[in-house]
Image (cartoon, helix red, strand yellow):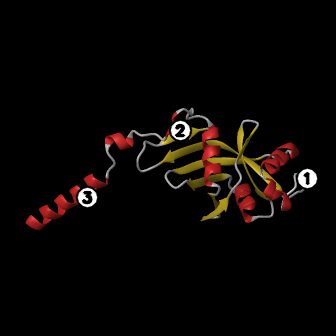
Amino acid sequence: MKRLFLLISAMLTLFACSQPSKEAQAVVPSEYQSINPSNMQQVRDFLHKTGVYFLATVDGDQPQVRPFGTAEIIEGKLYIQTGHVKNVAKQIEANPKVAICAYDGERWLRITATLVEDSRVEIKKAMLDANPGLRSMYDENDDNTAVYFLTEAKATISSFTAEPVEISF
């Protein structure tokens, strides 16, 4: 009985020491304090800051995750880009529900959304103009360039020391 008491006491002590204080939990990073939580710009900025984020799709009943780098706001929508010949585009066509995850070294961003393809040449051009490194692989006039905007998006920016910031768009 004494061992059980000591074990429980040790576990409670460890748990209490591992929890951030109330003051630490209330801290919201200054770069997010003045931003309207419903603003997708905050999500775009986070994705740009990380440089690489991870997009999850499903292939049948198997999750698939891969790195992505494009994220731009065009005409008030958050867009990503890939190629139609890639498996990811085929997976999005079969099931447009996706998840995105990114980490900036202190905070992480998780998004669930539904992707909608936008086949307009001007949107493809805007995406490629914003990401000129893709021009060696894609062109707005080819049949390969695929751009999608996020709908029904729910994003959460979390950390170990601050309350989560929730964003919907």
Residue bearing the label numbered 3: 14
Instruction: Answer with left or right where residue 59 lies relative to residue 17.
Output: right
Residue bearing the label numbered 1: 141
User: Which of label 1 and label 3 is nearer to you?
Assistant: 3
Mark before the other along the chain sequence, 2 or 3: 3
The answer to whether mark 2 and mark 3 are in CB contact below 8 A is no
Question: What kind of residue is marked 1?
Answer: Asn
Comparing 70 with 121, the one in front is: 70
Farthest residue, direction right: 141
Q: Residues within 10 Å of mark 2 (few under 14, many from 20)?
A: few
Question: What kind of residue is marked 2?
Answer: Tyr
Q: Report how far apart the C-alphas of labels 2 and 1 lie in the structure.
A: 38 Å
Instruction: Answer with left or right where residue 19 lies relative to residue 8.
Output: right
Instruction: Answer with left or right where residue 68 lies relative to residue 166.
Output: right
Q: Is residue 1 something that shows in the picture? A: no
Q: Tell me the element at label 1.
A: loop
**Residue 166 percent coordinates (x, y):** 52, 40
Q: Residues within 10 Å of mark 3 (few under 14, many from 20)?
A: few
